[in-house]
Amino acid sequence: MRIIVTGGSGKLGAVVVESLRAADHTVVVFDKAARRGEGVPVDLTDAGEVLDAVAGVEDLHEGVDAIVHLAAIPAPGIRPDVATFENNVLGTHHVFQAARRAGVRRIVTASSETLLGLPMTVPPEYFPVDEEVTLPNSTYSMGKLLEEQMALTFCRWDPALSITAMRFSNVMVEEDYAGFEAWQDDPAVRRWNAWGYIDARDAADAIRLALEVRGPGFERYIIANADTVMRTPSAELAAAEFPGVPFRRPVEGTGTLLSIDKARRELGWSPSRSWRDAQG
């Protein structure tokens, strides 16, 4: 496929671009930080600019088959709330709208684990937390909820459109794993997302599969690693930090407390990397 990746210069985006090209897809990067020859510096908050760039860019593409939308202010607290909301929600709307106008029928968009109730100052109703939980607790997270609702609406308007929202857990690259040891003596430090993470390479695999196997309509998936960031068994972590929260199914060993069952079942995806491999 010919695929636009917005935010292709970012932490996850760079890995996704490499993964898609390795799978023989043609990739065009849209990124405000892109240098000449590496991508197109598109302002996603400018609707006309986005529509024009999706339709075609001289010497780069004359139309694409799919869009991976990763560009965003990636977390609360980086910019003022209004700036975060306007950048993320407007940008996502303009990407969806441009895709629809240009006849692009496959989109994968970055949603967020923050919709699972992060930071978990209020304990979740159950473990493992799954996609049925939608509890935004910040302006950033509220924006992600609106983006998911927009995706659902666009797919209702256009039954041929496929939009997949990925609720990515905390994205990590190999260089990050050396820092995991600092958390082992104090589980509370990583309590805020139930000790979840996602290796960027596994996230890229999930994106590629969604592009290749999903049919029309909207779906959301939690994308997290199969294990936690801790050496302590997950049931012990939950009992200490979230006493009384029931388990809907057993979680063995250091298995994730963020359910990835739906992505495994519907996308055929399963994470294959772990921070433990890097530790030796």
Image: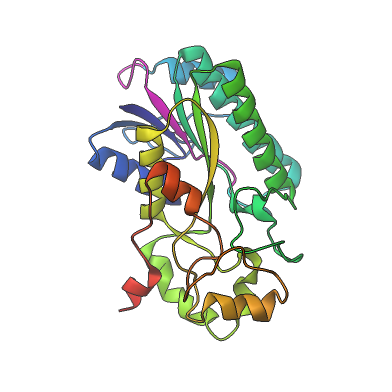
Q: Is residue 46 visible?
A: no
Whether residue 62 is in magenta: the answer is: yes
Q: Position of residue 159 (x, y in %)?
A: 53, 18
Quarter occupied by residue 60:
top left
The residue sitting at 24% across, 39% down in the picture is 23
Whether residue 97 is in magenta: the answer is: no
Q: Position of residue 214 (x, y in %)?
A: 42, 33
- Residue 35 relative to residue 238: left or right: left
The residue sitting at 57% across, 43% down in the picture is 111
- Residue 70 relative to residue 63: left or right: right
Above or below residue 157? Residue 198 is below
Residue lying at the far front of the rendered structure: 249
- Residue 255 relative to residue 189: left or right: left
- Residue 37 relative to residue 130: left or right: left
The residue nearer to you, when weighing 42 against 125, is 125
Quarter occupied by residue 34:
top left
The residue nearer to you, when weighing 100 against 84, is 100
Q: Quadrant of the N terminus?
A: top left
Query: Residues in magenta?
Result: 58-73
Q: Is residue 191 visible?
A: yes
Q: Quadrant of the C terminus?
A: bottom left
The residue sitting at 60% across, 48% down in the picture is 131
Mostly what secondary structure, the magenta segment? loop
Q: Position of residue 3 (x, y in %)?
A: 36, 29
